[in-house]
Image (tube, helix red, strand yellow):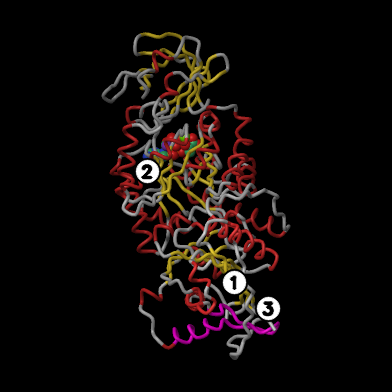
């Protein structure tokens, strides 16, 4: 005889001392079996509810099953019948999932769906509707717009196109806006797309403003203190050393420099200056992380309803907290996630509190590699990825993953190894920058990210190589602790029982992220009622976000989900799933009827 076990836990008091577990109730199936299932059906319900919920008379059996031979959800069966009898309204019966996930599920089955999420920076090479569609088809989960480049009108156009793509073609591509930040960078080269600096040439770096065209071999610099802060003999590095100059003379606002490492100058390239082998951090270290131009861009992002704002050159947790409260006061539904870009020495110093304050982090290796020795970047990446996982924040590995694909249709072997390592570290997302913004092969680059991710993820699963990473408790309340324990246990059970999928019903996405944090072997179907939450979950490892209207009644939710997903061929009878929810804190193991 099989059974369901309900544990009722009072949370009316926050003291763990009042934790009580009632006598487990065993419910015996009396109904006939609806669908034979291979494995027995069990349910563990841990309830963190109001005191009145402790009244056992109110608690109906959640699951009833027959030992070994099969089982049914008792009240689900009733609900199932009800659903079948009454034609549900279009809205309540619809489930929204993006076209690519649906196709992937149908073609490859649960287990081989991609877990690592992919972000593409949109630029001149990819801003057309068809180009955006091609990226979405190829697996883009998030489109990134970089406010360093382009006008607000241009960015608005991209956002509109992505939204239209989602509406018309059924994708769920989220939008990330990346701020310019106020580190030192070059101006826009007077409209030229690039300029070549040759060995030994003398260039003028100036804080003077010019109307285009710029005088020959002139570079404008955005930081007024620049000419005062540099000294003759300093090394001036463009983009972390792609081009190098030596300062030979200072004349008022002009700084004459000799090119010592020739190369291509790109508009708004980052500038750092070095003295005696050390990065010089003068008054520019005091520049605000969010400049006045950034605040205008942020207002723009809020008005356009972007899903993520990535903050460049974060130095401390304060700026993240400040931005989050600013957004909360202004954004319509107050739910734009703030991503801290880790790309400066200060951000490394204050890493834990910055990640703690933010909704996610980005290992922005481009600028990071210009501020710390290059050989230190891989270990910092590993550290940031691991810390984010421990603190339950999604993490993005960004920059130069496939840099050579800006020009060539295939990557270098070293680039493939780098992508593999990021996937092996189990970062949530990989990001393309120049490869998709202005490269010649944006779709091919995305395909490489996708195929390498799939390959490494599969190999990892086949070898059953689960990394030993300690996941400390992060809950801030007793109820949170229950959610966390449920997710940890559910993920472990999912691995041990080799279930096909985890289902999580989560209104704000928190339980979905707790499951994702465990990096289980099976995919996680995350059901949420809000479109914005669904788009945001797109950034997190292993989550397949669905939008679905559901009630507080888990039995009817499960029943409804099964029938909707079955009707669309995304699951089938007999599939083994584990379901958890943040309404009724529970773990249920069952075969799809
Ligand atoms: N909207 C755009 N318009 C024109 N060019 C763009 C645009 N977005 C990106 N690019 C080009 O693609 C390159 C790489 O994009 P990316 O967003 O990584 O720029 P970045 O300036 O290196 O990054 P960040 O400023 O965040 O450190 C840029 O240097 C720029 O040449
Ligand atoms: C992405 C970014 O900002 C960087 O790598 O510097
Ligand atoms: K930026
Ligand atoms: Mg950067």
Tell me if residue 53 comes above or below residue 478 in the rendering: below
Give how far across and how far down residue 517 sits, in percent.
58, 53
- Asked whether the residues under the numbered discs 1 and 2 touch, taking CB atoms below 8 Å apart as contact, a structural biologist would say no
Nearer to the camera, 298 or 483: 483
Mark yes or no: residue 406 visible.
yes
Give how far across and how far down residue 211 sits, in percent.
26, 24
Side (left or right) of 183 relative to 584: left
- 278 in magenta: no
Q: Which residue is mark 2?
A: 325
Of the numbered discs 1 and 2, the one sitting upstream in the chain is: 2
Q: Which residues are magenta?
A: 60-84
Tell me if residue 159 comes above or below residue 98 in the rendering: above
Q: Which residue is mark 1?
A: 588
CA separation in Å, label 3 and label 2: 49 Å
Tell me if residue 135 comes above or below residue 527 in the rendering: above
Q: Is mark 3 within 8 Å of ligand 2?
A: no
Give how far across and how far down residue 397 sits, in percent.
55, 43
Side (left or right) of 380 relative to 244: right
Q: Which residue is mark 3?
A: 39
Secondary structure of residue under mark 1? strand
Residue appearing at x 64%, y 36% in the figure: 379
Side (left or right) of 512 relative to 223: right
Nearer to the camera, 538 or 443: 538
- 80 in magenta: yes
Q: Nearer the viewer, mark 3 or mark 2?
A: 2
Secondary structure of residue under mark 2? helix
Structural crowding at the residue carrying mark 1, measured as other residues with C-alpha within 10 Å and reported as few (<14), some (14–19) or many (≥20): many
- Asked whether the residues under the numbered discs 3 and 1 touch, taking CB atoms below 8 Å apart as contact, a structural biologist would say no
Structural crowding at the residue carrying mark 2, measured as other residues with C-alpha within 10 Å and reported as few (<14), some (14–19) or many (≥20): few
Q: Quadrant of ligand 1?
A: top left
Secondary structure of residue under mark 3? loop
């Amino acid at each position: 005889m099989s059974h369901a076990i309900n544990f009722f836990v009072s949370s009316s008091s926050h003291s763990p001392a009042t934790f009580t577990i009632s006598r487990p109730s065993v419910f015996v199936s009396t109904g006939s079996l609806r669908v034979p299932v291979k494995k027995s059906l069990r349910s563990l319900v841990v309830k963190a509810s109001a005191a009145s919920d402790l009244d056992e008379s109110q608690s109906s059996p959640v699951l009833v099953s027959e030992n070994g031979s099969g089982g049914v959800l008792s009240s689900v069966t009733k609900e199932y019948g009800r659903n079948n009898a009454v034609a549900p309204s279009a809205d309540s019966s619809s489930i929204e999932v993006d076209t690519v996930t649906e196709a992937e599920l149908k073609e490859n089955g649960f287990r081989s769906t991609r877990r690592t999420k992919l972000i593409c920076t949109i630029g001149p090479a990819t801003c057309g509707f068809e180009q955006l569609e091609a990226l979405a088809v190829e697996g883009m989960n998030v489109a990134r717009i970089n406010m360093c480049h382009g006008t607000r009108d241009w960015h608005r156009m991209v956002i509109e196109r992505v939204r239209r793509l989602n509406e018309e073609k059924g994708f769920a591509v989220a939008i990330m806006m990346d701020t310019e930040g106020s580190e030192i960078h070059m101006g826009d080269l007077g409209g030229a797309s690039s300029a070549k600096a040759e060995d030994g040439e003398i260039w003028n770096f100036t804080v003077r403003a010019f109307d285009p065209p710029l005088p020959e071999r002139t570079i404008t610099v955005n930081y007024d203190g620049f000419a005062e802060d540099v000294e003759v003999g300093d090394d001036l590095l463009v983009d972390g050393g792609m081009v190098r100059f030596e300062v030979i003379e200072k004349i008022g606002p002009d700084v004459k420099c000799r090119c010592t490492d020739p190369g291509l100058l790109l508009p708004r390239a980052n500038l750092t200056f070095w003295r005696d082998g050390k990065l010089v951090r003068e008054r520019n270290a005091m520049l605000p992380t969010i400049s006045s131009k950034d605040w205008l861009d942020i207002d723009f992002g809020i008005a356009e309803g972007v899903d993520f704002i990535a903050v460049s050159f974060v130095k401390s947790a304060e700026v993240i907290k400040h931005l989050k409260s600013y957004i909360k006061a202004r954004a319509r539904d107050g739910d734009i996630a703030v991503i801290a870009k880790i790309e400066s020495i200060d951000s490394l110093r204050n890493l834990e509190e910055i990640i703690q304050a933010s909704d996610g982090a980005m290992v922005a290796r481009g600028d990071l590699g210009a501020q710390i020795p290059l050989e230190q970047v891989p270990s910092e990446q590993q550290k940031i990825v691991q810390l984010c996982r421990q603190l339950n924040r999604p993490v993005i590995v960004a920059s130069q993953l496939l840099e050579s694909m800006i020009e060539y249709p295939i990557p270098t072997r070293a680039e493939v190894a780098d992508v593999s390592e990021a996937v092996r570290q189990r970062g949530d997302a990989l990001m393309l920058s120049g490869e998709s913004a202005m490269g010649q092969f944006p779709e091919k680059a995305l395909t490489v990210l996708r195929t390498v991710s799939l390959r490494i993820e599969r190999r990892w699963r086949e070898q059953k190589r689960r990394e030993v990473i300690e996941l400390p408790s992060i809950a801030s309340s007793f109820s949170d602790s229950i959610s966390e324990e449920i997710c940890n246990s559910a993920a472990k059970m999912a691995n041990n029982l080799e279930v096909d999928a985890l289902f999580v019903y989560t209104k704000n996405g928190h339980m979905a992220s707790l499951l994702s944090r465990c990096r289980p072997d099976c995919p996680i179907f995350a059901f949420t009622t809000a479109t914005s939450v669904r788009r945001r979950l797109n950034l997190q490892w292993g989550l397949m976000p669905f939008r679905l209207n559901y009630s507080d009644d888990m039995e009817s939710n499960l029943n409804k989900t099964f029938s909707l997903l079955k009707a669309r061929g995304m699951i089938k009878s007999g599939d083994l799933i584990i379901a958890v929810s943040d309404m009724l804190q529970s773990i249920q193991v069952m075969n799809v009827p």
